[in-house]
Image (cartoon, rainbow, N blue to C red):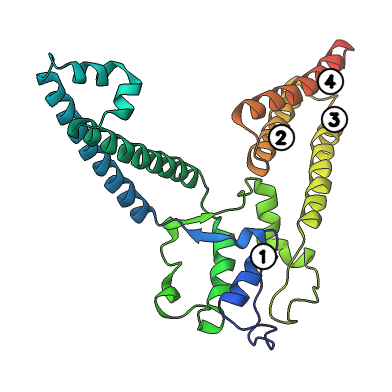
Amino acid sequence: MESDVELAAVPSAPSRLNGYPSFAAFIAKDKDAAIHRKFESLSGRSLLYQQSELHDLQRQLEEIDLEDAKEIGDINAQRAARLWHHYSTDTNRQSLLRRNLQGKIRIKIKEYHEAMMLESQVLSLSSPTSQTLTNFKRWFTFSETPTLWGRDERLFDEEQDLVALAPVDADRLKIFRKAYFGWFFKEKTASIPPGRMFYFPERRVQRAGAVISVLLSAVLLIGAIVCLMLVSNKDIGIRVGFIVLFTCLFAAVVGLLTNARRAEIFGSTAAYAAVLVVFVGNDVGNGK
């Protein structure tokens, strides 16, 4: 979470009523707390009803088309099928029925397509991370008293139905820092009751991540070169073993502590190994 929440045993006096006012303030303070139910079952049922309704309207339109086909010699039916002006102004019963049905289909199919697009967007939302959800529930059930009462006390029990509106952070190193070292980045905020919770700003976590990334890169590169220099007078097999060791360490760091894709991991690891191989090759060429 951008601002992880830690709860003390006894809350301070609230600055607003507990319930919807405090809940809304909590979500507004921390974008990662924007966790909501998507009501997947209800949404799916609604789409199924709309789909069946359109299917029935399609049946009605096909029945009208069949009746028109029986009157193939009727000039009015021919004009209604070929002339827009005649179709839109004809006042006989069949034409009125067709236009009314088509108007209803136009409205219903627009609603159905909009519902499908919205459902597609909702399905593309990610679930909250376990750490974010844990902190969210800890706040919601603070002192074993849910923020909302009645049926809403169990509003967030179905975890598989919850979505995070904010983008979910996929940086493993950042997730690790937030989960275990959030207290180190905490910031006192006047609007938050002391002793009840603390927040840490995202910028502090990002700065720490940049420093850690630079240090890891330097250690893996300079450390490998120093080690290879120390064993430069050893057997070539030992130096190759060190190359394998540091290459595996580099690949593990890139793969586990970043959100790099497989192709990026392969490419960066190959480049790192190439540097070490060139270094050892120069030593071999110099007769060391």
Pick the residue in front: 104 or 262. Answer: 104
Q: Name the kind of residue labelled 1 in the image.
A: Ala
Marking on residue 28:
1
Residue 31 on image: x %, y %? 66, 59
Q: Residue at x 51, y 52 (%)?
A: 127
Marking on residue 225:
3
Marking on residue 250:
2
In the picture of the structure, the residue carrying the numbered disc 4 is 279
Q: Name the kind of residue labelled 4 in the image.
A: Phe
The C terminus - image quarter: top right
Q: Name the kind of residue labelled 2 in the image.
A: Phe
Q: Residue at x 81, y 20 (%)?
A: 280
The span from disc 3 to disc 1 (Cα, nearest Å) is 49 Å
Using the image, determine if residue 42 lies above or below residue 138: above
Q: Which residue lies furthest to the left in this view?
A: 70
Q: What element carries label 1?
A: helix
Residue 159 on image: x %, y %? 44, 60
Residue 119 on image: x %, y %? 43, 45
211 with respect to 22 (left or right): right
